[in-house]
Amino acid sequence: MSIEVINEFGKIDITNDVIAQVVGESAIECYGIVGMASKHQIRDGLTEILRKENFARGVIVRNIGDDTHIDMHVIIGYGTKISEVAYQVQSKVKYTLMKTVGLSVKSVNIFVQGVRVTNL
């Protein structure tokens, strides 16, 4: 599926993969996020940190009517407050999508797939 943006200059179709990539890149900029995890844990094996080119594998974009919902699978750094990190990721994702794509998001659901100790 894709999202269609129409303005006075014409029409733009933005695919869910592009939205997922933007969401993944904005999420890893947040403090406490070690990386993105795969949304298909059973098929892909153990929880692994996805590289930059695979961020879309950790994000699910759902379009229900006019509402957009995002599910994210993340790995959190050890010693951080999970609820605070999740709130920061939700805020950053909503802000980034509004500024870059002009898309208002109804919900951002965070699924913590693991906790990792980061090297300082």
Image (tube, grey):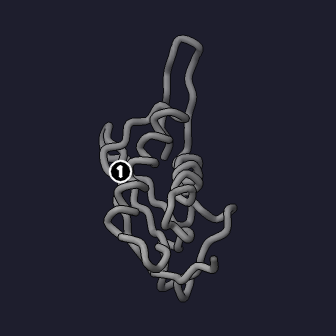
Residue at 69% across, 62% down: 53
Q: Which residue is nearer to you in this view: 13 or 116?
A: 116
- In the displayed structure image, the side of residue 26 where residue 73 appears, left or right: left
- Residue 75 in percent (x, y) is at 49, 74
Q: Quadrant of residue 44?
A: bottom right
- Residue 23 in percent (x, y) is at 52, 52
Give the total number of marks visible in the rendering: 1
Q: Which residue is nearer to you in this view: 117 or 68?
A: 117
Farthest residue, direction bottom: 46
- In the displayed structure image, the side of residue 111 where residue 44 appears, left or right: right
* Up/down of 95 relative to 4, above or below: below
Position of the C terminus, as image quadrant, is bottom right
* Up/down of 35 relative to 67, above or below: below
- In the displayed structure image, the side of residue 90 where residue 57 appears, left or right: right
* Up/down of 54 relative to 113, above or below: above
Q: Amino acid at mark 1?
A: His
Q: Residues within 10 Å of mark 1 (few under 14, many from 20)?
A: some
- In the displayed structure image, the side of residue 67 where residue 25 appears, left or right: right
Residue at 45% across, 35% down: 98
Residue at 32% across, 37% down: 66
Q: Disc 1 marks which residue?
A: 69
Residue at 50% across, 33% down: 99
- Residue 97 in percent (x, y) is at 48, 40
